[in-house]
Amino acid sequence: MMKRSLSLCLAFALTLPLAACVTPAAHPQANGAITIAPHSYHDNIDIAGRFSVQFQHNGRPESWSGSFTWAQTPDKTTVALLSPLGQTIATIVADDQMATMIQSGQPPRSAANVDALVQDTLGWPLPISHLRDWLQAYTVNANGQRILETPTSPAIIATADGWNLDFVSWQDDNNSGMQNAPKRIDLERETSEAGKVAMRLVITSSQVH
């Protein structure tokens, strides 16, 4: 199967250590020495970075790593996952009506729910619907309002659907218009399909349009 072969290939690829994903720790900037300049939410933004994820497949540990690109407009999100060698693993395109995943050598797969589509296809969850907020350091409260997190926010933020979210480090200076945006985000969640999932996202560049 395509999903299984990709997992076996990437298990031997360069991975990022994930030990910090499960340990609540104070952010290094959370000592009051940093002055936070608030930023607005951006509907049009391009982001690039690295990812690594650990999960269970048929009761056995698996790991993926590589890079990603993220292109966001008010109506659409386009995500590409790439291997450490730069080969495209999957491309996901989602709007308010439909999500489609494209993998090399496979017919496109579509579903109304982008997160369910990714889980079913890759075998591990990638919360694209939430990352539209999290990649810009926003979380959403019970009333659906965006809350801007900062380096002084709690070390671990529990989301309503079971993710433990940690903004581990922050951009020091970014000329893209994303000052005080996250640099590294750790995610953790217990799932029935993939066991304990631990993910790391490191943002290397961002550009606001």
Image: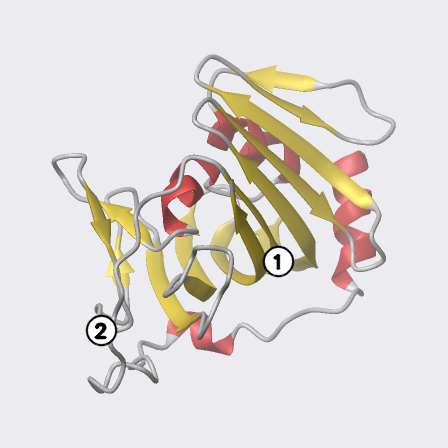
Disc 1 marks which residue? 49
Disc 2 marks which residue? 152
Relative vertical location of residue 153 with respect to residue 70 in this rendering, above or below: below
Residue located at (24% from left, 76% from top): 35
The spot of residue 77 in percent (x, y) is: 53, 31
In what element is the residue under mark 2? loop
Residue 173 seen in this snapshot: yes
The amino acid pointed to by label 1 is Gly
Report which quarter residue 20 is drawn in: bottom left
Residue 59 seen in this snapshot: no
Name the outermost residue toward the top: 97
Dot placed on the residue nearer the N-terminal end, 1 or 2: 1
The amino acid pointed to by label 2 is Thr
Residue located at (46% from left, 71% from top): 173
Q: CA distance from mark 1 to mark 2?
A: 23 Å
Q: Quadrant of the N terminus?
A: top right
In what element is the residue under mark 1? strand
Q: In the drawing, what numbered circle is on residue 17?
A: none
Q: How many marks?
A: 2
Residue 143 located left or right of residue 57: left
The spot of residue 201 in percent (x, y) is: 53, 60
Report which quarter residue 156 is drawn in: bottom left
Residue 59 located left or right of residue 42: right
Residue 94 located left or right of residue 43: right
